[in-house]
């Protein structure tokens, strides 16, 4: 069969089958790329700072339109209300987020049992590798700029100990701090106290959290088409192989037909069909 496949016409057929398969593979990649797409593009409007109180209200669910918005707020920190969130990565190193409670000036106060006189929001102020290096928040009135992020979910069955939190979870922190809070938190990018920037220095590193990429959705129809083109690519090679195999079998059948025709015309016979004449040196055919 190899001799048949090495004939010029079948070599040309193989090249054509490979070209067709390559086109089908490219079409499969194109369909696969279209099978996932963003739900919505990242909005450039989130990078324009807006007042926190104009973007988010306390006591309500966190709206999706407020996620990733850069916000500003004035207020003060409470040095007694600060926790460290372990397991946070910065440049490949594992450490802690420093999360402090920030009383928002001008924020509406909640009413009801357990509501605090002021409304607070958790602020992730920076990252440290060692918990002992976490500094206290700046005192006095602070002008805060940062990215607004939805509350994280607390880790179940986790007790990180005093001064620790499993996640930046508003539901968990309001119980620790006993305050009323906005439904999200702020990842600080700048802080000003008494008109002077509060520089992040020493072992503390800034978070520098950018806008989060939008969620991806899967188009199953495009994914099915991608798999279908791969099948077509394999089918093109299968057809070439089957044609070569059929040609090889036809060659064997033609050879057998030629041998049968020679035997019918009195050509050479098999040894089993002859016998030796004891009186002659020439064999004769049995009748």
Image: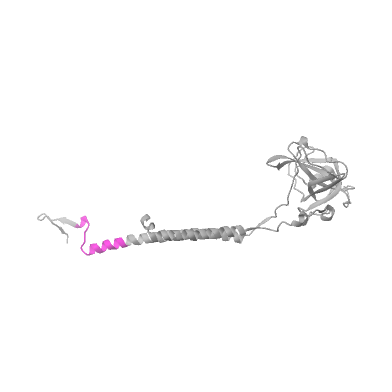
Q: Is 20 in front, or is 238?
A: 20
x, y percent for residue 47: 76, 54
Quadrant of the rendered structure where residue 279 is? bottom left
Residue 243 left/right relative to 233: left
- Rendered residue at 29%/63% (across/down): 257
Q: Is 120 in front, or is 54?
A: 54
Q: Is residue 228 magenta?
A: no
- Rendered residue at 57%/57% (across/down): 29
Say which quadrant the N terminus sits in: bottom left
Q: Can residue 235 be spotted in the picture?
A: no
Q: Is 109 in front, or is 138?
A: 138
x, y percent for residue 192: 84, 45
Residue 32 left/right relative to 155: left
Q: Is residue 259 magenta?
A: yes
Quadrant of the rendered structure where residue 7 is? bottom left
Number of numbered discs? 0
Residue 16 left/right relative to 26: left
Is residue 203 depicted above or below 183 in this figure? above
Is residue 160 depicted above or below 49 in this figure? above
Residue 221 left/right relative to 214: left
Q: Residue furthest top?
A: 132
Say which quadrant the C terminus sits in: bottom left
Is residue 116 depicted above or below 272 in this figure? above
x, y percent for residue 275: 16, 56
The kind of secondary structure the magenta stretch mainly shows is helix
Q: Can residue 258 be spotted in the picture?
A: yes
x, y percent for residue 16: 46, 61
Which span is picked out in magenta? 254-273
Q: Residue furthest right?
A: 117
């Amino acid at each position: 069969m190899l001799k048949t496949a090495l004939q010029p016409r079948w070599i040309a057929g193989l090249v054509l089958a490979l070209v067709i398969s390559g086109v089908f593979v490219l079409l499969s990649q194109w369909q696969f790329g279209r099978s996932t797409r963003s739900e919505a593009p990242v909005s450039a409007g989130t990078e324009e700072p807006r007042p926190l109180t104009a973007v988010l209200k306390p006591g309500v669910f966190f709206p999706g339109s407020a996620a990733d918005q850069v916000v500003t707020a004035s207020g003060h920190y409470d040095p007694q209300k600060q926790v460290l969130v372990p397991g946070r990565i910065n440049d490949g190193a594992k450490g802690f987020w420093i999360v402090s409670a920030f009383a928002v000036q001008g924020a509406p106060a909640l009413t009801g049992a357990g509501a605090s006189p002021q409304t607070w929001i958790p602020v992730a102020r920076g990252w440290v590798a060692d918990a002992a290096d976490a500094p206290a928040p700046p005192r006095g009135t602070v002008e805060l700029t940062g990215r607004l992020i939805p509350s994280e979910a607390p880790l179940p069955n986790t007790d990180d100990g005093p001064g620790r939190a499993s996640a930046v979870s508003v539901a968990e922190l309001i119980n620790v701090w006993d305050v009323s809070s906005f439904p999200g938190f702020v990842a600080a990018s700048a802080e000003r106290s008494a008109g002077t920037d509060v520089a992040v220095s020493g072992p503390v590193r800034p978070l520098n959290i950018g806008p989060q990429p939008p969620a991806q959705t899967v188009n199953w129809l495009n994914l099915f088409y991608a798999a279908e083109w791969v099948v077509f690519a394999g089918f093109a090679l299968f057809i070439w192989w089957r044609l070569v195999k059929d040609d090889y079998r036809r060659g064997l059948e033609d050879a057998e037909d030629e041998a049968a025709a020679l035997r019918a015309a009195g050509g050479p016979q098999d040894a089993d069909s002859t016998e030796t004449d004891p009186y002659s040196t020439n064999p004769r055919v049995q009748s």
